[in-house]
Image: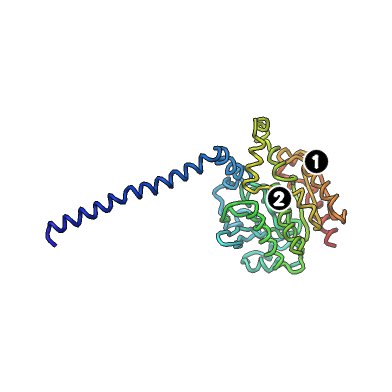
Amino acid sequence: MDARDCAAAWWEMVARNLRSIPRSCSTLGRKIAALYNSFTSKPLKEHIFPPLMNMLIFFNFFKAPFLVDLKRPELKIAHTVNFYIRVEPGVILGIWHTVPSCRGEDAKGKDRCWYEAALHDGNPIIVYLHGSAEHRVAPHRLKLVKVLSDGGFHVLSVDYRGFGDSTGKPTEEGLTADAICVYEWTKARSGTTPVCLWGHSLGTGVATNAAKVLEEKGFPVDAIILEAPFTNIWVATINYPLLKIYRKLPGFLRMLMDALRKDKIVFPNDENVKSLSSPLLIIHGEDDNTVPLEFGKKLYEIAHNAYRNKERVKMVIFPPGFQHNLLCKSPMLLKTVRDFLSKQWA
């Protein structure tokens, strides 16, 4: 091929590329137009508000305490091991297992297998489902675990998907699946040792969601403890201190409800308890300003009316001084829990 042929071939290639530009531009233009139409077909609030509400409900991006090695629980609490459970592809949960203090000496130097085997030693087990924000090493959560451990309980402190070092993104359906997975994993290893789901704040919604699913499967949970519960996330959210000041803005409540509905966030404790038969203990602080006591009382009333066996439902109100997160500091907490469970599991 001489120089003239090479030049002709080159110009032919350029011509083909130039002819393709309009088609490429047209395709790109259609894609841009589709994205634009998709965005402008809905109000700006629909693009912003649902994700914002998701962040406010779960608050999982706030991973305090910071600079904590979640793989080394011994730096924060004694006779505890860290391990992980795979719930589904892409979702692995970080969990701390703290054995009862009475087994602290036995636990020294032991690996995960020893801890797992210890679950059927006869000491009752609590699967702890925490509230929004932070992770399993939050100070008030550690304090509760220590109190329960000293009281003779195994405690499994669970970080839901997207919390702590657990993978995945939080959704109501996802958190419910996490709780069910951990409960079933624990029951499979506990023998005849009873297992209690303990939910705090947001975790109460996770606990009753999980308990309802297990009840429907024919395997009611051994017991449920709800600490500072709400009736449903809608009521809890519109009464949340940070949002109260916006309630009188035109259209705010409707926008809020639409956002929660769009994200499928309900956590209907009030509906769930109507379907349960498990022993249910509700504990609430009198001076809780985050989830006011009236919600706990209302939930107890609904549960008590729905349960056939009224003795399976109990509520204990704690005096002022402990607010939303610090019932763990009450000297009556451990006795309240032990008395209730021992009676139910007798």
Q: Quadrant of residue 308?
A: bottom right
Number of marks present in the image shown:
2
Q: Amino acid at mark 2?
A: Gly
Residue at position x 58%, y 56% from top?
166
The foreground one among 303 and 62 is 303
Q: CA distance from mark 2 to mark 1?
A: 24 Å
The local crowd at label 1, few if under 14, some if 14 to 19, many if 20 or more residues have their Cα within 10 Å, is few
Q: Residue tagged by mark 1?
A: 319
Counting from the top left corner in percent of width and height, residue 78 is at: 65, 57
Q: Quadrant of residue 242?
A: top right
Residue at position x 64%, y 47% from top?
132
Residue at position x 17%, y 55% from top?
8
Counting from the top left corner in percent of width and height, residue 161 is at: 60, 54
Counting from the top left corner in percent of width and height, residue 299 is at: 79, 46
Q: Secondary structure at mark 1?
A: loop
Q: Residue tagged by mark 2?
A: 205
Q: Is residue 23 above or below residue 103?
A: above
The foreground one among 238 and 81 is 238
The local crowd at label 2, few if under 14, some if 14 to 19, many if 20 or more residues have their Cα within 10 Å, is many
| Mark before the other along the chain sequence, 2 or 1 | 2
Quadrant including the C terminus: bottom right
Quadrant including the N terminus: bottom left
Q: Is residue 61 above or below residue 167?
A: above
Q: Are marks 2 and 1 in contact (CB under 8 Å)?
A: no
Q: Secondary structure at mark 2?
A: helix
Counting from the top left corner in percent of width and height, residue 83 is at: 60, 62
The foreground one among 214 and 255 is 255
Q: Amino acid at mark 1?
A: Pro
